[in-house]
Image (cartoon, rainbow, N blue to C red):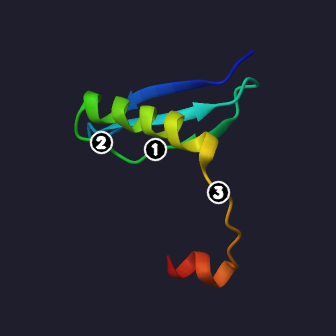
Amino acid sequence: MAGKFEMYTDRAGKYRFRLKAGNGEIIAVGEAYGTRSACRDGIESVKRNAPIAEIHEVSDGAARRN
């Protein structure tokens, strides 16, 4: 089974998305968006940019500063 994006509204009424793997596990989550259209644009950005994204390893200390 292929992965899928799920769009939903959170408790604050903002639109969010999550990417689920074929086995149902959540593998990515998006930020809160004010509109459904902006959330869809976020999904499209992930689809477009993920295949060409570089991988950067950071230390725990660097991750906490960012």
Front residue (pair 24, 41): 41
Looking at the rendered image, the disc whose residue lies closer to the viewer, 3 or 1, is 3
* x and y percentages locating residue 32 in the rendered image: 34, 45
Residue at the image position 40 percent from the left and 28 percent from the top: 8
Q: Are marks 1 and 2 in contact (CB under 8 Å)?
A: yes
Q: Are marks 3 and 1 in contact (CB under 8 Å)?
A: no
Residue at the image position 27 percent from the left and 42 percent from the top: 12
Alpha-carbon span between mark 3 and mark 2: 25 Å
Q: Local crowd at mark 1 within 10 Å, few (<14), some, or many (≥20)?
A: some
Q: Which residue is mark 1?
A: 30
In this rendering, position of residue 63 left or right of residue 6: right
Alpha-carbon span between mark 1 and mark 2: 9 Å
Q: Identify the secondary structure beneath mark 3.
A: loop
Alpha-carbon span between mark 3 and mark 1: 18 Å
Is 46 located above or below residue 5 in the figure? below
Q: Which residue is mark 2?
A: 33
Q: Which residue is mark 3?
A: 54
Q: Local crowd at mark 2 within 10 Å, few (<14), some, or many (≥20)?
A: some
Q: Identify the secondary structure beneath mark 1.
A: loop
Give residue 1's quadrant in the image.
top right
Is 40 located above or below residue 65 in the figure? above
Residue at the image position 71 percent from the left and 69 percent from the top: 57
* x and y percentages locating residue 43 in the rendered image: 44, 33
Q: Amino acid at mark 2?
A: Tyr
* x and y percentages locating residue 20 in the rendered image: 63, 30
| Mark positioned earlier in the residue sequence (3 or 1) | 1
Q: Are marks 3 and 2 in contact (CB under 8 Å)?
A: no
